[in-house]
Amino acid sequence: MHKPLLSFFLALLLVLVAAPSRAQTALYFPPSPADGTWATTSPQSLGWCQPQLDSLLSFLGRRNTKSFLVLKDGRLVVERYYGTYTADSIWYWASAGKSLTAVLIGLAQQDGLLRLSDSTSRTLGRGWTSAPLAKERLITVRHQLTMTTGLTDTPPPPCDNESTAAACLTYRADAGTRWAYHTGPYRLLQDVVARASGLTLNQFSTQKLTSRLGMSGLWVNDVYYSRARDMARFGLFVLARGQWNGTPILTDTSYFRQMTTPSQSLNRSYGYLWWLNGQPSHKLPGPQQTTFQGPIIPTAPADLIAALGKNDQKIYVVPNLRLVVVRQGKDAGNPTLAVSSFDTDLWRYLMAVVNCRPLAARPVVPPSAWQVYPNPAAGVAQVLLPATAPAGSQLRVLDMLGRERWKQPAAGGTPNALPLTGLASGAYVVQWLDQAGRILSTKRLVVAAQ
């Protein structure tokens, strides 16, 4: 082949490789709120089905939702507000703000203000816990990011999981050897950022991140508050892997990768304050140290990562589908600190929209097919599922306000001990769930006084 012809084909090949495919449309980044409107894309142009979308929006309305946004390639496809809530209304992120803090820690390390391997005592000083000093020194910034400080996550009253007082932060295990969802040590990460930078948390957030994304939220008493679109901007920034409209912001690609992949082997569904779908197992917030098989949201794409907060505050990022999904509101019926059955239900509806297929029906098992005994029970109850119970079955106990009090794996054909210790006497609901978190059947249980 002649050299000019060879050069032509090589140049053509480079152009074809560099050109984005139709399936990989360049990400759109909205202007600042003062500079213009957010570009939109219609669901129909994406091949999404309107009847399924209508069902999704009705479902959300029934589940105490205030706002629901979906971005595709950065453009708004769905933006719905409920009741008196509007695009200008402010709501709290709850623990979804943990994922925002994770980015701030990455920026602080990028600026040389701290290292993840630093002992937390280096910034907060000795005695920030009541653990023996030798054990306290073992706790690093990385342990705070990964929920592996080893401090007691269920301290006795008047302390609780969110307490930051040294007297409430007691030694349970060596740092790095136990995973437990513990908000107190996380909240002190915000103090680490402030002391390392010499700025308030709001000043550091604004200067280093939020103003550059066009966000206008605010930290108040360790909790972030913002509009729904601010949550969407943050999700888009993460979808873009730490850059905004061509401007690199979180340039430490190693940190970004570690933040959004399993950060330790104790709970592979947790990165640096981000929840990760698609992993073989997971642990959940709560006193039990149970490992559940399967991903946190079986109905969602495996590559989904999520910022999840109490009462179902949600930011989902799905790289392969190039989606950002935001939900604000009150609890959707199963109040938990992070992952809830609402995640599974929401994604069952949303994937029916995206794939334009009928909504998958919920399997139902008659109550007569399984047993809960004795009833009333004190101390422990036994649950006998049929031998044909699907693999990955789970049991969940709810109080009469719908609050989850206990959850555990369950096997068919053999009694499953259901501990009732710590539950006040009264009526409860026992739910049999499949691996996807869908309710197969429900029974009532009375807990007797002990």
Image (spheres, grey):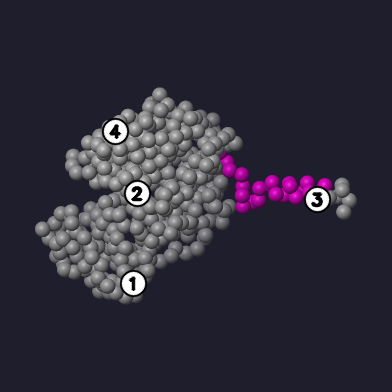
Q: Earlier in the sequence, mark 2 or mark 3?
A: 3
> Where does label 2 land, which residue?
177
Instruction: Classify residue 382 as left or right of residue 189.
Output: left
Circles 2 and 4: CB atoms closer than 8 Å: no
Q: Is residue 81 visible?
A: no
x and y, in percent, of residue 16 in the image: 72, 49
Q: SS of the residue at dot 1? A: loop
x and y, in percent, of residue 332 in the image: 33, 51
Please identify the residue farthest to the front as the structure is shown. 134
- Crowding at label 1, few (<14), some or many (≥20) Cα neighbours within 10 Å? some
Question: What is the distance, in whole Å, between disc 3 and disc 4 at their CAs?
Answer: 65 Å
> Where does label 3 land, which residue?
9
> In this picture, which residue range is highlighted in magenta?
7-29
Q: Which of marks 1 and 3 is nearer the N terminus?
A: 3
> Where does label 1 land, which residue?
389
Question: What is the distance, in whole Å, between disc 2 and disc 1 at their CAs?
Answer: 34 Å
Q: Which amino acid lies under the numbered mark 2 shown in the image of this protein? A: Thr
Give the mark toward the camera: 3 or 4. Answer: 4
> Where does label 4 land, which residue?
128
- Crowding at label 3, few (<14), some or many (≥20) Cα neighbours within 10 Å? few
